[in-house]
Structure formats: structure tokens, C-alpha cells
Amino acid sequence: MEQKNILDEIKEKKSILPRQQRQLCDYILSKPIEASTLTINELAKRAGVGTTTVIRMIEALGMEKYNQFKTRLREGMFAQHTTSYMVYWDNENSAMNPEDNLLSAIGSCMEVIESLKRPDFIRQVSEGAHMIIEAKRVYVLGLRMSVGTSMLLEHTLRNYSFETQLLSREADYVIDRICEMDEEDILVCLASSPMAKTTADAIRLCSKLGRKVLVITGRLDSDLADLATGVIDIRMSRRPATIPAITVALELLSMELARLLDERGESERKRHIDKVEKISADNDIAIWE
């Protein structure tokens, strides 16, 4: 027997549910895409209810686990062809939001990239590069949609011979790793909107411990911005263009790091040659004729 679309189930059962659960249903039905990306605590907060209410609504729909609910919610959106994932292929969808079309999203990316040509952003990139240069060790954190860009940054920093540790693969141990940081170390957080709770907690802990933190983001809440040592803010929170814009910011940061290293006589090419010469000398290997 084919399983009913969960969005239809919510509509049918909403009227017989308690008030708080009806309020939760209204939120999910009004913002199914956003709801499908949230943790149980985030969903409860956005809907203005408690986590217990979320659990009870899930049980009323015949499910035991929150992840099962999120999976069915995504499947329901795909089935109805009403999401940004499917609308691109449905050109006859009269309800299509132009911003959900892939080509429009690419156009938005180009607009955002052009908007980065501003003095304050260039200054932020320069200050961020100086912070990284002066650090003894660089910790990189990016969760949710920022995992990929965090890996790109880690790869770049390692190529420049910075001692780097990627925390994105060990989200459960982020707090432990921050507690191990020295005063000379720096945490670089990549965060699209909405920011993951673990990332926000990491920024707050760094501030409390007196550790440096550089945040590269599309939008940063004012209280977190005050806690960060430095911020590279692309001033944009629309998801289709956030990640490409942050990637451009990382490319600019990489170029600035290369320039600063070259000014200090610490370019990657020179470091590599010095390393080869030292190993050769230590092992009596003649490599230059």
C-alpha cells in the first residue's frame, strides 16, 4: 500500500490535535522546506512550541523518530513538486517563485559576487588573512551547508603549510577541541544562515576562553559578531547564493594569504625549496648540479 504524503496527513489530522500541535502543524505547512532542515530543538523554537510538542505530533502521525519525520517531509515536498529542488523541472508550475529557478539563482550569485567589491569587505578579508598569518595553529569549523567550504579552506591552508585541524568531521568533539586551543591559535568558522547551534556555541566559548575566532558568513547575529575577533561578512543570507559567495570570499582570502606570505619571504614555493634542501643536506643527497 502506497504511503500517503505526510503534508496531506498533517492537513487532515491538524484539526483534531491539541492547540500547540496545531500551531506546529501550521508552521510546518507554511515553511516545509525550512522545517525539513531544522533540528528538533530548532523546529520547536521556530514554531513557538516545546520539543515535547514536536515529539507528540510525530507520534500522532504514526512515527517514532524525528529523522523519520524529516525524511518523509522531504519526500512529501518532492512528490508535490513545490520545492526549490523540483520546481526547476516544472516550467508549467504557475506558483513557481523566480528565485527558486536554477538560472535565476545563478544570476543572484553573480549579483552577490559583484556586491563584494566594497571597501569594508576588502578590509575584512585583509584583517582575516593577518589573523591567520599570526596564528600558531588554525582550527576550521563548518557545519550543515558549510562542510564543503570548510574542507576547501582546510585544503588551502595546508597547501600554504599552516598547521590546520578540520573540526567539521568531528562535530561531537568541537567543544573539546576548542578547550585544547592555545592563546596563539585561531578558530575559523564558516557559517551560512541559519547558523548551526554548535557553531554559535563554539564562538561563545572562544570568547569566554579568550581565544581568537574569525567568522566567515552570509549573516551574523549582532551578539555573535560582538564576540568574534574578526568577521568576513558577505551580507547575504539567501541560500541559493550564500555558498558560492562564501567560496569567492575564501578565494580572495587565499590570494591575500599568498601575498602576505610572499612579502614575508614565506611563500609556498620558497618553503618547499627550503624543506627539500634541508632534507637533502641532512641525508647527504646532492640534488643541485
Image (spheres, rainbow, N blue to C red):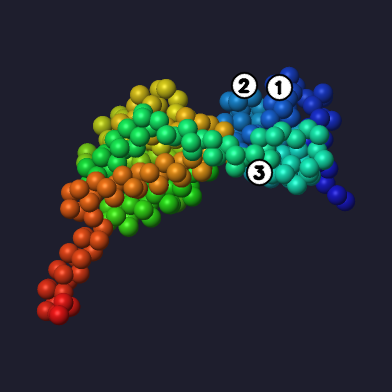
C-beta proximity under 8 Å, tags 3 and 1: no
Residue 105 visible in the picture: yes
Q: Quadrant of the C terminus?
A: bottom left
Measured along the vertical axis of the image, is residue 89 above or below residue 94?
below
**Front-lying residue, 132 or 250:** 250
**Front-lying residue, 274 or 22:** 274
Indicate the amino acid at tag 3: Leu
Q: Secondary structure at mark 3?
A: helix
In this picture, residue 124 sits left or right of residue 91:
left
- State the image coordinates of residue 147 (x, y, percent, origin top left): 48, 47
Indicate the amino acid at tag 2: Gly
> Alpha carbon of mark 3 to alpha carbon of mark 1: how far?
32 Å
Residue highlighted by disc 3: 102
Residue highlighted by disc 2: 48
Residue highlighted by disc 1: 23
Indicate the amino acid at tag 1: Gln
C-beta proximity under 8 Å, tags 1 and 2: yes
Picture quadrant of residue 39? top right
- State the image coordinates of residue 164 (x, y, percent, origin top left): 31, 51
Residue found at x 42% / y 22%:
222
- State the image coordinates of residue 225 (x, y, percent, origin top left): 38, 26
C-beta proximity under 8 Å, tags 2 and 3: no
Residue found at x 31% / y 44%:
256
Residue 176 visible in the picture: no
